[in-house]
Image: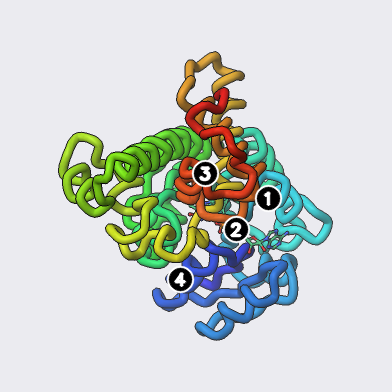
């Protein structure tokens, strides 16, 4: 079993590190939020005093951070992972970040003789808790082979997508599809409500019909049909709307740079921008249901479906 430094113990990193402990790995965990480290320590992890100590703890370092700037800081800072990792350590960044940062940090790691993978995930907090995440990996094949048995303790599907940055490319495409499908599901349930059709009835029909999708059957944005979904706990995240907006912006940047046509992706980015501007950023991304119902602060008096997107 490996000793692993784990940095970033939030909504995803916390349960992922817990699953590594369950698989008998030793974890030295660190987060800027003390309560997150304490929660890991209660499950049997070691509380690291900082990034440097977590990075030096083992032959594998895993990070699960909000976005590119935090990944640069944590890896490239003077007290960061690259300065303190053991020689030959394997570095695995599971955060969703821009392809450019993923490649730049991996190149800086390679200069120090360290293998690094971008390994973003899909499956949400439910998948993180159940160890059923999908990992999409960018980096070289030898590093992938080293990482696979460790990632298997946290996920069910582990795919080598290609060279450095390929995992992030797959992730932003996946999340652009997810955002558009979540909004479509919300709109369907909002319309059903206006038509007097109960949410459970629409769910029973649509979840077995052609509109069936993950956003509906695993993460239903109306309370009731899927008990584990954030809609049942007042849209506590889960996956925050702020992080979904971040991913949609990354997708739009990539679409702009490559000339890909993504009109629904652009509309989804605009709607999430409005939801976040109205105060929805810390809520789960499925909380955009409330924006469409005009319940969220900042949605204003004009109906969301009349908003220029
Ligand atoms: P989160 O905000 O809950 O967790 C991030 C953690 O990183 C926080 O606990 C924060 O305190 C910590 N952190 C920030 N800066 C740090 C630093 N310098 N040093 C140490 N710790 C630091 O976010 P999350 O929902 O766990 O998401 C993490 C990443 O995974 C994001 O990139 C997100 O887009 C991606 N993701 C999230 C989900 C989801 O459903 N939540 C699903 C797939 C991918």
Q: Badge 1 is on which residue? A: 71
Q: Is the CB of mark 1 within 8 Å of ligand 1? A: no
Tell me what residue is drawn at x 46 percent, y 25 percent.
Answer: 264
Q: Badge 3 is on which residue? A: 294
Report x, y in % for residue 222. Answer: 37, 53
Q: Residues within 10 Å of mark 1 (few under 14, many from 20)?
A: many
Of mark 1 and mark 2, the one earlier in the sequence is 2
**Is 76 situated above or below 101?**
below
Q: Badge 4 is on which residue? A: 20
Which quarter of the figure is the C terminus placed in?
A: top right
Callout 1 touching callout 2 (CB < 8 Å): yes
Of mark 4 and mark 2, the one earlier in the sequence is 4
Instruction: Report whether 66 appears left or right of 205.
Output: right
Tell me what residue is drawn at x 49 percent, y 58 percent.
Answer: 235
For label 1, the SS is: helix
- What's the mark number on residue 63? 2
Of mark 3 and mark 1, the one earlier in the sequence is 1
């Amino acid at each position: 079993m490996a000793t692993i430094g784990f940095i970033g113990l939030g909504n995803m990193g916390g349960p992922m590190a817990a699953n590594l402990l369950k698989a008998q790995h030793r974890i030295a965990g660190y987060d800027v939020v003390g309560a997150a480290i304490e929660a890991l320590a209660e499950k049997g992890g070691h509380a690291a005093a900082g990034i440097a100590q977590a990075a030096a703890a083992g032959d594998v370092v895993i990070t699960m951070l909000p976005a590119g700037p935090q990944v640069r800081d944590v890896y490239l800072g003077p007290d960061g992972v690259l300065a303190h990792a053991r020689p030959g350590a394997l570095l695995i960044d599971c955060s969703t970040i821009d392809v450019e940062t993923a490649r730049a940090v991996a190149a800086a790691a390679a200069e120090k003789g360290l293998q690094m993978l971008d390994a973003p995930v899909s499956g949400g907090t439910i998948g993180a808790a159940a160890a059923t995440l999908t990992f999409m990996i960018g980096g070289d094949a030898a590093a992938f082979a080293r990482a696979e048995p460790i990632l298997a303790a946290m996920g069910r599907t582990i795919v080598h997508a290609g060279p450095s940055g390929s995992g992030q490319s797959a992730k932003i495409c996946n999340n652009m599809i997810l955002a558009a499908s979540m909004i479509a599901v919300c709109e369907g349930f909002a319309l059903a409500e206006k038509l007097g059709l109960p949410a459970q009835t629409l769910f029973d029909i649509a979840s077995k019909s052609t509109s069936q999708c993950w956003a509906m059957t695993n993460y239903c944005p109306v309370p009731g049909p899927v008990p584990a979904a954030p809609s049942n706990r007042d849209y506590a995240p889960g996956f925050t709307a702020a992080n979904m907006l971040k991913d949609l912006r990354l997708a739009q940047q990539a679409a702009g740079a490559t000339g890909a046509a993504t009109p629904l992706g652009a509309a989804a980015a605009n709607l999430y921008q409005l939801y976040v501007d109205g105060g929805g950023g810390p809520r789960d991304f499925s909380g955009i249901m409330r924006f469409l119902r005009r319940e969220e602060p900042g949605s204003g008096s004009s109906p969301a479906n009349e908003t220029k997107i």
